[in-house]
Image (cartoon, rainbow, N blue to C red):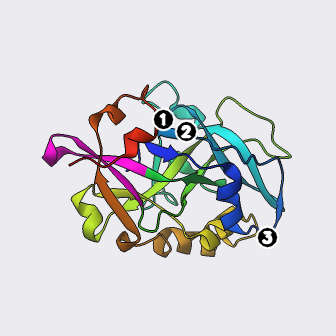
Amino acid sequence: MCGRFVQAAAPGAYVKLLSLQGELFGVVSDIQIERYNVAPSTGVWVLTSEDGGARPQTLRWGWEPHWAKGGKPPAINARAETLWTSKFWAAARHHRLIVPADGWYEWVAAEGKQPYFLHAADKAPLYFAAVGLFPTQTRAEQDDDGFAIVTGAADAGLLDIHDRRPLVLPPAVAAEWLDSATPAERIEEIVALCGLAADAFAWHRVGKPVGNVKNQGKALIAAID
């Protein structure tokens, strides 16, 4: 799963690697975000799919259909295995966005809930596939706006950390995900086949202060013995 992540680079750095083919509707800052402990229910800088391009905006992490409100907390992850079949995602699954990140955290129960920081082995930015509802040129902001990160089953070495992982897309595929003209068949293929493999990532233990959402700063991702 993905329940906490890092978004530290500048929006401009994330966008540059995507080589978007369409228009970018909005201003992209070159000031670093420097969020080292992004938590659910908070606003997150994302890129949403727009007819003819993509739109940078801040969107709440967490989404639920209107008929599910008042029950469980909004979902922060959308399982790839049920994304196309579950009634829960019917209103959101065709509204795509990318959540740029520098890595994410997982807690290993077998080690006394030891937190780990997972990142690209080459330290490159990560692009999480996500779905949700959000403002566009033709849709005003609404109370149910938000997003959930698509997750899939972990494999290989990642299984030592957790049995689920976010769907992380290579930059070129992330650009396809954002393109509203990408056929539905290709989108389903991306979810099933195009996530980065386990050997694209590296991970290390970090200190337990990351467990408190109030804590921030680069020290949270520093490796410990």
Real-space CA distance between mark 2 and mark 1, rounded to the nearest whole angstrom: 5 Å
| CA neighbours of label 3 inside 10 A, class few (<14), some (14 to 19), many (20+) | few
Q: Which residues are magenta?
A: 104-119
Residue 207 image point, x, y percent? 28, 39
Amino acid, disc 2: Trp
- SS category of the residue bearing label 3: loop
Amino acid, disc 3: Gln
Residue 118 colored in magenta in the image:
yes
Q: Is residue 97 above or below residue 174?
A: above
Of the pair 114 and 70, the residue shown nearer to us: 114
Judging by the rendered image, the residue that carries numbered circle 3 is: 21
Q: Counting residues from the N terminus, which is met first, the one under dot 2 or under dot 1?
A: 1
Judging by the rendered image, the residue that carries numbered circle 1 is: 40
Tell me: 83 left or right of 25. left
Q: Main secondary structure of the magenta part?
A: strand
Residue 124 colored in magenta in the image:
no
| Quadrant in which residue 143 is drawn | top right
Seen at 35% across and 46% down, the residue is 222
Residue 78 image point, x, y percent? 47, 51
Disc 2 + disc 1, Cβ < 8 Å: yes
Of the pair 193 and 82, the residue shown nearer to us: 193
Judging by the rendered image, the residue that carries numbered circle 2 is: 61
